[in-house]
Image (tube, grey):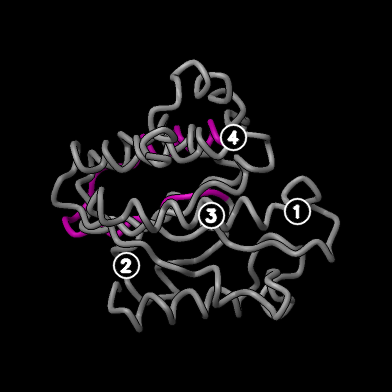
Amino acid sequence: MILAAVLLAPLSAAAQYDSTYGSTYYRQKVTQFNGIPDTESGEIIFLGDSITDIAEWADLFKNCKIKNRGISGDMTAGILNRLSEVTRRKPSRIFLMIGINDLANGVPDSVIISNYAKIVDRIRRESPATKLYVQSILPTNDQFTEFARHQHKEARIAAINQQLERMAVQRGYTYVNLHDALCDSEGKLSTDYTNDGLHLKGAGYLVWKSILQQKKYL
């Protein structure tokens, strides 16, 4: 019942937060993505915000079919706004991670989960053969001050991740728990994997890669 109430959050509430993702960089990247021709079948798309944007996915996995559709600063509403560019390519797999910027910008959990449900439903409708992997929102570390607005969200991150995991069976995607493998003993993003409290260093991406490979998702 709680999940149903979350997913039925009023559209007006969601609309209140839909304009905060539209930075100059966002628009630059979206116009680039829209201009890239469809390529070979079997594309694998990593979709998300700066945590996705930073990584050299094709090199990391030695797979030229992997495409990076991360945009720094993006939010769940931003993913919805640009999702058609992804689904039109009919990728074999999509690896999605989004939500930490929503939290930093004051978007309620109910709106984040509602937007996630819309993203999943659109992928299912527009590219039904695509395997979807929803990856957990990662922890942060308040030892660093550069991204203060993203800090002290541990309880909300945990709650959203729990809902995403529960939704997986209902909506037919695979939930990937990256969060726990990147935590230190206090539940914060380990300094082994970050140097700013939000984004990952190379070692963090190697952990990410290892999890996806161990589970044979890639």
State how far apart marks 4 and 2 are (Cα). 37 Å
Are circles 2 and 3 on residues that touch, CB within 8 Å?
no
The kind of residue on which mark 3 rests is Asp
For label 1, count other residues whose C-alpha is less than 10 Å away and answer few (under 14), some (14-19) or many (20+).
Answer: many
Secondary structure of the residue carrying numbered label 1: loop
Along the viewing direction, whichever of 32 and 211 lies nearer the viewer: 211
Position in image of residue 4 (x %, y %): 36, 36
Reading the image, the residue beneath label 4 is 108
Reading the image, the residue beneath label 1 is 151
State how far apart marks 2 and 3 are (Cα). 16 Å
Q: Is residue 210 above or below residue 187?
A: below
Reading the image, the residue beneath label 3 is 53
Along the viewing direction, whichever of 185 and 79 lies nearer the viewer: 185
The kind of residue on which mark 1 rests is Gln
Q: Is residue 21 visible?
A: yes
Residue 45 magenta-drawn?
A: yes
Q: Residue at x 23, y 44 (%)?
A: 89
Position in image of residue 29 (x %, y %): 50, 39
Q: Nearer the viewer, mark 4 or mark 3?
A: 4
For label 4, count other residues whose C-alpha is less than 10 Å away and answer few (under 14), some (14-19) or many (20+).
Answer: some
The kind of residue on which mark 4 rests is Pro
The kind of residue on which mark 2 rests is Cys
Q: Earlier in the sequence, mark 2 or mark 1?
A: 2
Residue 23 magenta-drawn?
A: no
